[in-house]
């Protein structure tokens, strides 16, 4: 089993920045892909960004150029630096991890409890 614990959410004004963190513990040596999904009120959960152990990254078009995903493999911690935040970035952000990239793309694997991000206009 793998446990994921997120931190770093909060309330910020439009144009501001936040940094989310997610630490994996337990049987985390099997983890390759780590990523972030988000769910806005009344909307489906969507993929935000993914990073592999090798450093490959994938971003949703809506966050390209504003968000940066990074990772410290030694302690299986993933970060999401969010800049130039917009009100439409509001939602619960979930950390997601698995041994297979496609599982994280598809929203399968291990999940954290989520952290709220609210961007005011």
Image (cartoon, rainbow, N blue to C red):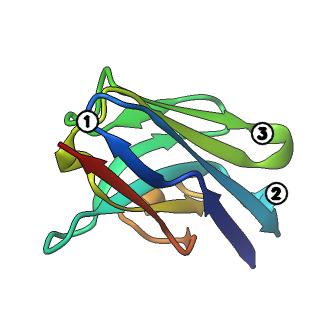
Q: Residue furthest bottom?
A: 1
For residue 19, above or below residue 3: above
Left or right: 33 as drawn, with respect to 45: right
Q: Nearer the viewer, mark 1 or mark 3?
A: 1
- Circle 1: element type: loop
The spot of residue 43 in percent (x, y) is 15, 69
Q: Quadrant of the C terminus?
A: top left
For the residue pair 48 and 1, the one nearer the viewer reads as 48
Q: Quadrant of the N terminus?
A: bottom right
The spot of residue 32 in percent (x, y) is 65, 49
- Circle 2: element type: helix
Query: What residue would you read off at disc 3?
Result: 73
Mark 3 or mark 2, which has the lower sequence index? Answer: 2
For the residue pair 100 and 68, the one nearer the viewer reads as 68
The CA span between labels 3 and 2 is 9 Å
The spot of residue 52 in percent (x, y) is 59, 40
Q: Residue furthest left?
A: 42
* Residue at 21%, 34% in the rendered image: 61
**Residue 21 appears in view:** yes
Query: What residue would you read off at disc 1?
Result: 14
């Amino acid at each position: 089993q793998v446990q994921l614990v997120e931190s770093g959410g909060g309330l910020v004004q439009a144009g501001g920045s936040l940094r989310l963190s997610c630490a994996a513990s337990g049987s985390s040596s099997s983890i390759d892909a780590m990523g972030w999904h988000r769910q806005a009120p009344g909307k489906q959960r969507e993929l935000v960004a993914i990073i592999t152990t090798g450093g490959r990254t994938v971003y949703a078009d809506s966050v390209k150029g504003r968000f940066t995903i990074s990772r410290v493999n030694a302690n299986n911690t993933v970060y999401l630096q969010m800049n130039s935040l917009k009100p439409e970035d509001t939602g619960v952000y979930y950390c997601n991890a698995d041994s297979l990239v496609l599982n994280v793309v598809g929203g399968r694997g291990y999940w954290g409890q989520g952290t709220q991000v609210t961007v005011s206009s």
